[in-house]
Image (cartoon, rainbow, N blue to C red):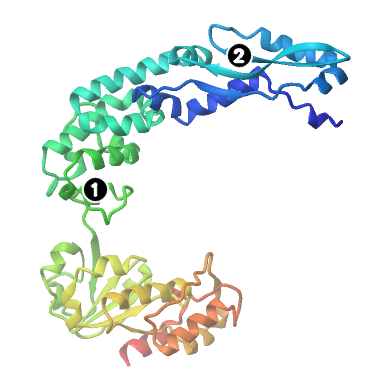
Amino acid sequence: MTVAAWRWSTPSELLTKVRRRWSSGELLTAYARQRWEPVVVPLRAPTAAEVAERFGAAQDWLAEWKAVDPALIRLDWKRVGGRLVGSNEVPHRASIDTPDQAWALLRVRRNVETFTRLLDLTRQAAPALVEWMTAEPMKVLDNADSWARLVEVVRWIDRHPTTGRYLRQIDVPGVDTKFIEQHRTVLAQLLDRQLAPERIDPAQPPARFAERYRFRTKPTYVRLRALDRPAPAALGPFSEVTVRVDELARTPLDVARVLVVENETTHLALPSMPGTVAVFGGGYAVRALAPLTWLHDRELTYWGDIDTHGFAILDRLRQVFPHTTSVLMDSETLLGHRAHWGREAAPVTTELAHLTAEELQLYRDLVANRYAPALRLEQERIRFSAVERTLTG
């Protein structure tokens, strides 16, 4: 018989199994909900043949079990025997009958007392959270030092309207925005149980904490540059401004054309174009421009890198503004600048549904590495004479 066959259960294995049920929260949940049942673990004991074959090892194994504390673990015994070694009693089942026995065996009594104290306090302050606490006791213990503040944050949000308020305005002692950020996952689980349904935006994940609970969010800004020269009338006396998107959405610009570019140096170097304002997209063009509904009545042009991400941004922008055109994102521009080709770090391969036939073909060529692996032509590497010729021609 192989060594693997001698897999008799040991007290340490029993402890591991019980500890696993503690770590999962199962034991504490049953205790908190007054549904405790004895923890019963079947034991793999030696058979009569195994006792005969390895009598010494079986006696050592039996001595281990006889040494366990009967005040904590109840053992059920059965008789095994044979002609060679006689009749022997061996444990075949171990039981931990009461919560106190389990806490003593696992040495977690202080944790249980902490959880019970926090449960009692919360039952008085915010009873709607109790069911979650009993379902997730280990998360409560993980946050034991912060629990009182977490409950107070939940109560404060419940008592105050969040619309028009920033997270910074939550006024709870010992709580700041960093605290909210660090605990947003558990706070979201608590708020989902405390708040009325209309206070929660289910379309927003807990990671977007402010949006989910209808707090005011940090405004998005957009950087604009008037390309009318020498008199940039579109932006008043300023050639370049950075403004809040929500305010720009309410104040349409008196321009015929808006040109979106992704590179800052390119944005600053763009040639003069009558009736045109340039937007520095910086990779966030869609989020910045989507609220500007007046762009539907303007000529809108996008110029990004010739790589898979550049076409993905164009695709997303066109989902919001279908009339968007692209410039300098074609195979002629790509092939005319071989000396400036680079490599894209992490190409995308998603099928894009909002490209023109020519754009889609070039995008698929890039995905298929037709010209070079992970090919990228950054817009700042395109010769400026080509830029001027295309944009002002």
Amino acid type of the residue tagged 2 in the rendering: Leu
Q: Is residue 175 above or below residue 94?
A: below
As helix, strand or loop, the secondary structure at mark 2 comes to strand
Q: Residues within 10 Å of mark 2 (few under 14, many from 20)?
A: many
Image coordinates for residue 346, horizontal then vertical, percent: 52, 65
User: Where does the N terminus fall, quadrant-wise?
Assistant: top right
Closer-to-camera residue (33/256): 33
Of callouts 1 and 2, the N-terminal one:
2
Looking at the image, which residue sits at the far bottom?
393
Disc 1 target residue: 210
User: What mark, if any, has residue 184 been given in the picture?
Assistant: none
User: Relative to residue 100, is residue 191 drawn left or right?
Assistant: left
User: Where does the C terminus fall, quadrant-wise?
Assistant: bottom left
Image coordinates for residue 255, horizontal then vertical, percent: 16, 81
Identify the residue at horizontal 40%, vertical 26% (top origin): 30
Disc 2 target residue: 75
